[in-house]
Image (spheres, grey):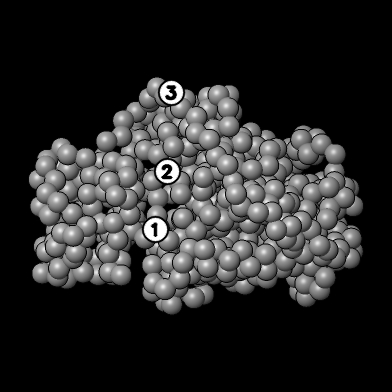
Amino acid sequence: MKYLKINPADNVAVALVALQAGEKASLDGVEITINADIPMGHKFALANIAEHENIVKYGYAIGHARVPICQGDWVNETTIKTNLEGLLDYNYDPKTYTSDIENRHLSFKGYKRGNGEVGIRNEIWIIPTVGCVNGTINALAEKMRMETQLHGVDAIVAYPHNYGCSQLGDDHENTRKVLRDMVLHPNAGGVLVVGLGCENNQVKAFRELLGDFDESRIKFMETQKVDDEDETGMTLLREIYDVVSNDQRTDVSLSELKVGLKCGGSDGLSGITANPLLGVFSDFLIAQGGSTVLTEVPEMFGAETILMNRCVNKNMFDKTVLLINDFKDYFMRNNQPVYENPSPGNKAGGISTLEEKSLGCTQKCGNALVKDVLMYGEQIKTKGLNLLSAPGNDLVAATALGASGCHIVLFTTGRGTPFGSFVPTMKISTNTPLYMRKGSWIDFNAGTIVENESIEDALERFIEYVIKVASGELVNNEKKNYREIAIFKTGVTL
């Protein structure tokens, strides 16, 4: 198959391989002459499209024609203009969803924590309250790795960041909330929190923010209050290690798994292969009693009504409207257009407008009903599909997903990226050439869905792989120790 018309209502098709000018394409009994070289993942017109006429893909308008487009023409960002506007009023038109997916009662090997939570990793984390101690925590992590050789633990990782001081309002609270969520995350068997002493994010107040916790696993150090922070830090880490290194994996129901859904470096195949694969996996996991979280609010613009009408009730619909319009207002307060999202890489991959990107992106969450809407820094409270407020930026969004309680982030990509957040960040390629070329980045290939594999068979392979990763198999970002965090910042730095 060299090209695909996704929805019967579409007036464009997608090239699944590079097409040459002069080639013939036959769709719906009509023979079309390709008028220009069409890169893989890009669109061509199935009929003449008049100036200002809507261009339809996935059965929805992805913008309108800037100029007249002829049948067989290459359709890209130079010939499409978005239909998106600013704040909108929405009406609730609820959709029903009944799952016929059986509960297979599957399990994985995880770590049961004393507070009832479950982790898929048993790591020791060193988390700073403020960026001033980044050098200290990096040195401590390296010393502890050398001393223990990681015997009995999965990793010992420092997570430097730039914040914790000189912040005001929401920025200060966002930093505190995300760091709190990390300290309490069940993938960490133990945590050393390191402060300076004079920062805004004071250790004493931060400790109170945690609520109840296991003091044998979470310890604190203020470097201005100790004579030798290296010696004191190592003593505390050894105490944590003595506890964490005795933890053992045990059988855990798949219903305990919480998964973040993310994409980046999208291409024209994202909405055909990898994102639909995550969609059917999301529906499957929810049918097992598990949870999935969709974020990247700007990449919901243009597809938001699909999500709104899947809300479980009117209250959840109202929260989703607030989620969307709050983020649009954030753009407008900063004098930025709400629709200027597709990156140069997205455009090179065949994504022309934000509507097109959003309609592909939202496929990651399947068809299940939206059970809850989380603000930035909030944690999952309700099983099922959740929406989370965070931007599209890969590392900021992936960090937010981990902070919400997700054990793992499933990250689809058509261009490739090596990064990882503080939870395993699994890369799923939209096309086989990327998987073949970047095997040290990509963990799973969904490109086979347009080659020789049904999405049902790909789903079975994917379920098996996710369970292996949840049970301890490392993904590429972990193998390379590519682990970072990024906290959302919106305001003034003092």
Amino acid marked by disc 2: Glu
Q: Cα distance, mark 1 to mark 2?
A: 17 Å
> In this figure, which residue is indicated by the disc labeled 2?
299
Q: 10 Å neighbourhood of mark 2: few (<14), some, or many (≥20)?
A: many
> In this figure, which residue is indicated by the disc labeled 3?
91
Q: Cα distance, mark 2 to mark 3?
A: 20 Å
Secondary structure of residue under mark 3:
loop
Q: 10 Å neighbourhood of mark 3: few (<14), some, or many (≥20)?
A: few
Secondary structure of residue under mark 2:
helix
Check contact, mark 1 vs mark 3: CB within 8 A. Answer: no
Residue at (63, 61) in percent of width and height: 424
Amino acid marked by disc 1: Ile
Q: Earlier in the sequence, mark 1 or mark 2?
A: 1
Q: Position of residue 409 (x, y in %)?
A: 59, 55
Q: Cα distance, mark 1 to mark 3?
A: 29 Å
Q: Locate the N terminus by quadrant.
A: bottom left
> In this figure, which residue is indicated by the disc labeled 1?
272
Q: In the drawing, does residue 210 fall left or right of residue 444?
A: right
Q: Earlier in the sequence, mark 2 or mark 3?
A: 3
Total of numbered circles in the picture? 3
Q: Locate the C terminus by quadrant.
A: top right
Q: Nearer the viewer, residue 298 or 184?
A: 298
Q: Is 444 drawn above or below residue 383 in the view shown?
A: below
